[in-house]
Image (spheres, rainbow, N blue to C red):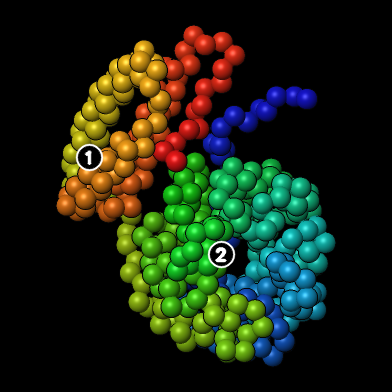
Amino acid sequence: MTPDKKNDMKLDLNIQPLSSWIKTGAEPLVIAGPCSAETEEQLVATAHLLAKTGRVSALRAGIWKPRTRPGEFEGIGSIGLQWLKRAKDETGLPTAVEVANSKHVEEALNAGVDILWVGARSTVNPFTVQDIADALKGVDVPVMVKNPVNPDLSLWIGALERINNAGITKLAAIHRGFSSHEKSAFRNEPMWDLAISLKTHAPNLPMINDPSHICGNRELLGYIAQKALDLDMQGLMIESHIDPSVAWTDAKQQVTPSALVELIERLTLRKPEIKGTVLQDKLGELRNQIDKIDDYVFQKMAERMQIIEKIGNYKKENSITILQVNRWEEILNKRIPYAKALKLSPEFAEKLLELIHSESIRKQTEIMNKGQEGQQPQEHLTHA
């Protein structure tokens, strides 16, 4: 067995800008179309309505539909590719299709599909991604990679690297949210921090947001779409059906072409900062203030940890347990209301306190185990 060569997640991708492989047209970039190609009439009619809006840059449609359980509608199959071809011929819209294996890649390319994407259920499996990547070698086609179903940044990065290593330089990521056991208003939790982290690792990688799969309902689409644009994502993939009420899949999250236009027109497009302007000078001044505060926070945190070390030594000398539940409850009861009074959200305050407490427990555990051979540090002990 050879040691892992990759010990970090920095992306060194050879990619082309988004504008080199898709006409953006009116901003923002929008890829739209039905969740599933159901009938030729449904797909072509929807495509015509989307093309007439002048706001859609590419037509998407599910041909093969990976479903959680068998027996549900799993896509119309290869025949739908011919319907897409007709829609493209009649409207001029480039087409985009999800592929889940090498056979899908071959059939989609033979049918003249312009853009391929790797779905969330495929991204989670490196074997599947590699199978797709192998089928793409020697092919010049844009490929978009959705985040994996589960919140694992390394899987997302790995999938992008595999596709790029196959010679695909027209590459983009799609942020479609992550599965979570926690109940919320969303079908898939946005977990914006993971999308931001990917953008940090690969600043030049285009990222497109998929509010349809994040929301699971059409009521929240505008909110998520605006948030994505505010985070400097380059476009949106939104499911649109000529009559969502009779859609065979994901009816609640699809919108009509006319509703799509209304949604887009309500969005606010914000400009990135421009170097050498008064705006950037002002931002620079404010960021300097933040840097000074951050330095102060870290200094105080270091002082706090020095006291934690003293507490750890005292507990060790007097055989006192590390975890003191009553003390933890006291901290929460005091600090969260205080944070709220300072106009900080209780959720943020609790997460911050949990992080600090976890590090305090880790340091005390390290002190307790110091010099004790054969004992494993309990680094994962928390406030449970």
From the image, tell me which residue sits under label 1.
290
| x, y percent for residue 194 | 48, 49
- Residue at left 54%, top 58%? 181
| x, y percent for residue 200 | 45, 43
Q: Secondary structure at mark 2?
A: loop
Q: Secondary structure at mark 1?
A: helix
- Residue at left 70%, top 56%? 122
- Residue at left 37%, top 28%? 360
Q: Please tell me whether mark 2 or mark 1 is closer to you in this view.
A: 1
The disc, 2 or 1, on the residue closer to the chain's N-terminal end is 2
Rendered image quadrant of residue 227: bottom left
- Residue at left 44%, top 49%? 193
78 left or right of 379 in image: right
From the image, tell me which residue sits under label 2.
22
Instruction: Work out whether 37 lies above or below 115.
Output: below
| x, y percent for residue 180 | 54, 57
